[in-house]
């Protein structure tokens, strides 16, 4: 009986122990099977990202604007725990605060198969020092990403742009991670998806010590697309140098397509400063610089257009049948409305003036009277149709829309009626009227091509996009073109300094009055803005441009010679004009 009881007890014990083993096995394989599988994979496998070579940006003639360079990152294999790591020593080695290292380890968690990136932008000396001490820090590795070097430094920075780490908005894109370098400015941002390509990966089997045993799988990266921008870097270099240290902007277009041939915004900055992550001191220097080098003046600044706007007033008057080339008035140096006197820039007056002479010599009184005849609303209609008062939609950067006032606009925004004196001011490009340098370029380009406003394009041979089209009367175009030729080539033309012995140039000067200019000694000095718009060759236009010099003075004296130099460079070219910069110049900006 005792033997039977003992046997029963042993049987129960065996069944109980077996049941416990079975339950534990069920727990390990069924309940926690997936978790342990992931852990085993994590201990056995490493995933290394293979960066995709970014597409190269060329100018329209095949000159390399950028080159790909390695970007070194120090990372930690994911199975290295903070407890086993000399955080203090690692902090000294890679010059990164201990708290930041711990934060990155915690953020990565326990489920990462990829290395945990600690710090990027290492130079060769830093890489060499880390490699020499890797045995002190098991799991520490050097990874390589693809970054950029901008061959021409600050030249063309506002159109070429630069790379950086993604913004929160860019992280929402399906193929962008925190470790992805993306375009943050200019063409680099505008065409980021085409340029970026698709990264690959290498899946490696490792042993318990983290040593690589074999490669399980390799997915090759796909190189980004090479792109040919529409700009001519030779013309871009000459254009920026022609400003001779002045702040301003210029936009040169192909009038038949809208392709951007040169885009100048000065002061500029060196995009190479951003490659490794700009430090606080450099950022403060850029952001607090009084010339605002990060501002794209071509699209983001708006100014009174001065006498350039007289072209709109002339178009409106002729297209509405209110004036023609023979419409004449006597300019005695001023005109009066009630107790108000509106003067001409030529105090003694121009005498008897017709349409052509009024444009050539930029007679203010003549355009006061055209404004009186036409009215602000009809002037505004043609201004808007020819690209003013609205963004161009290029997409290169946020744009200001400028302002073309109307009677309804003033009543809505000011709560007051429109006055005749305000029409006088608007008719000569003063008062409420403002335009961006881009809009001024669109206007002269439309006159050059017969009335079509093309959206500015940054890619060579891109399909033209029409913003608007104005069917101008042949007589209107004939008067405009002959007058613009006379501005540059006539004996009394205000743009004589744009005259070229080799190329027939047509253009219009503008001098916009401003309240005051603050010089480096903080003295307020009245100094006008200088404008010049032009196209060439006169008979078959291949380039149209606007030039704006901030507080430059007279448009004919300051802006016209710059336009001449840009036009001659683009149309005549010549070898050896450009050189590839090897180092950043100055503190990251140039006036």
Image: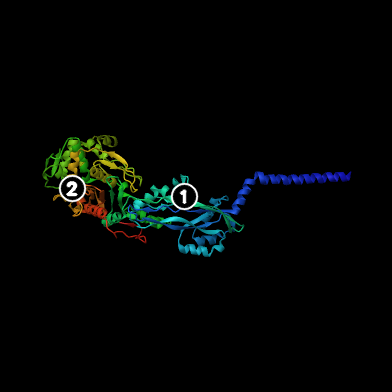
In terms of secondary structure, where does tag 1 sit?
loop
- Of residue 362 and residue 365, the one placed in the foreground of this image is 362
Q: Is residue 342 visible?
A: no
- Of residue 420 and residue 224, the one placed in the foreground of this image is 224
Q: Is residue 140 visible?
A: yes
Its colouring scheme is: rainbow
Number of callouts: 2
The residue that label 1 is drawn on is: 198
Residue 123 coordinates in the image, percent (x, y): 45, 61
Cα–Cα gap, marks 1 and 2: 52 Å
- Image quarter of the C terminus: bottom left
Residue 65 coordinates in the image, percent (x, y): 36, 55
Local crowd size for mark 2, using a 10 Å CA cut-off: few (<14), some (14–19), many (≥20): many
Q: On residue 485, which mark appears?
A: 2
From the viewer's perspective, is 157 left or right of 70?
left
Residue 276 coordinates in the image, percent (x, y): 43, 57
Residue 114 coordinates in the image, percent (x, y): 54, 52
- Of residue 507 and residue 118, the one placed in the foreground of this image is 507
From the viewer's perspective, is 333 left or right of 134?
left
Local crowd size for mark 1, using a 10 Å CA cut-off: few (<14), some (14–19), many (≥20): some
Image point (52%, 63%), residue name? 131
Res 388 → quadrant:
top left
Q: Which numbered disc, 1 or 2, marks the residue that appears first in the sequence? A: 1
Res 446 → quadrant:
top left
- Residue at the limit of the structure toward the right, as seen here: 1
- Image quarter of the N terminus: top right
In terms of secondary structure, where does tag 2 sit?
helix
């Amino acid at each position: 009986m005792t033997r039977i009881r003992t046997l029963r007890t042993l049987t129960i014990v065996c069944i109980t122990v077996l049941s416990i083993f079975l339950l534990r096995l069920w727990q390990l394989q069924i309940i926690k099977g997936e978790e342990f599988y992931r852990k085993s994979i994590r201990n056995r496998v490493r995933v290394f990202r293979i960066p995709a070579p970014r597409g190269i940006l060329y100018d329209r003639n095949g000159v390399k604007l950028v080159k790909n360079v390695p970007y070194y990152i120090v990372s930690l294999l994911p199975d290295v725990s903070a407890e086993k790591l000399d955080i203090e020593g690692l902090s000294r080695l890679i010059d990164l605060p201990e708290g930041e290292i711990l934060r990155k380890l915690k953020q990565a968690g326990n489920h990462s198969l990829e290395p945990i990136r600690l710090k990027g932008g290492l130079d060769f000396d830093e890489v060499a020092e880390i490699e020499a001490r890797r045995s002190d820090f098991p799991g520490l590795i050097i990874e390589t990403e693809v970054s950029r070097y901008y061959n021409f430094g600050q030249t063309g920075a506002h159109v070429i742009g630069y790379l950086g780490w993604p913004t929160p908005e860019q992280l929402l894109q399906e193929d962008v991670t925190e470790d992805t370098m993306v375009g943050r400015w200019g063409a680099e941002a505008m065409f980021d998806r085409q340029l970026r390509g698709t990264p690959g990966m290498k899946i490696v089997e490792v042993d318990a010590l983290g040593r690589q045993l074999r490669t399980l799988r390799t997915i090759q990266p796909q190189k980004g697309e090479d792109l040919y921008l529409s700009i001519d870097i030779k013309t871009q270099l000459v254009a920026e140098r022609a400003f001779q240290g002045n702040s301003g902007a210029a936009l040169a277009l192909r009038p038949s397509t809208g392709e951007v041939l040169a885009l100048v915004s000065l002061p500029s900055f060196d995009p190479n400063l951003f490659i490794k992550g700009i430090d606080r001191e450099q950022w403060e220097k850029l952001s607090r610089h009084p010339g605002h080098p990060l501002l794209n003046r071509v699209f983001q600044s708006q100014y009174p257009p001065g006498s350039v706007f007289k072209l709109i007033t002339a178009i409106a008057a002729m297209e509405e049948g209110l004036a023609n080339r023979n419409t004449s008035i006597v300019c005695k140096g001023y005109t009066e409305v009630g107790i108000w006197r509106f003067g001409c820039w030529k105090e003694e007056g121009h005498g008897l003036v017709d349409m052509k002479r009024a444009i050539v010599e930029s007679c203010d009184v003549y355009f006061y009277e055209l404004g009186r005849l036409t009215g602000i609303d009809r002037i505004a209609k043609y201004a808007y149709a020819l690209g003013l008062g609205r963004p161009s939609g290029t997409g290169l950067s946020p744009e200001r829309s400028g302002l073309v006032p109307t009677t309804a606009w003033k009543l809505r925004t000011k709560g007051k009626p429109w006055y005749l004196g305000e029409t006088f001011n608007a008719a000569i490009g003063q008062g409420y009227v403002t335009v961006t340098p881009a809009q001024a370029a669109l206007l002269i380009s439309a006159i050059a091509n017969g009335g079509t406003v093309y959206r500015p394009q940054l890619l060579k041979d891109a399909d033209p996009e029409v913003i608007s089209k104005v069917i101008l009367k042949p007589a209107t175009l004939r008067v405009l073109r002959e007058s613009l030729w006379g501005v540059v080539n006539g004996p009394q033309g205000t743009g004589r300094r744009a005259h070229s012995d080799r190329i027939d140039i047509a253009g219009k000067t503008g001098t916009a009055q401003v309240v005051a200019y603050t010089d480096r000694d903080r003295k307020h000095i009245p100094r006008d803005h200088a404008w010049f718009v032009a196209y060439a060759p006169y008979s078959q236009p291949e380039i149209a441009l606007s030039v704006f010099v901030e507080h430059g003075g007279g448009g004919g004296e300051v802006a016209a010679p710059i336009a001449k130099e840009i036009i001659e460079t683009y149309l005549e070219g010549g070898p050896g004009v450009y050189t590839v910069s090897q180092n950043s110049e100055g503190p990251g900006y140039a006036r």
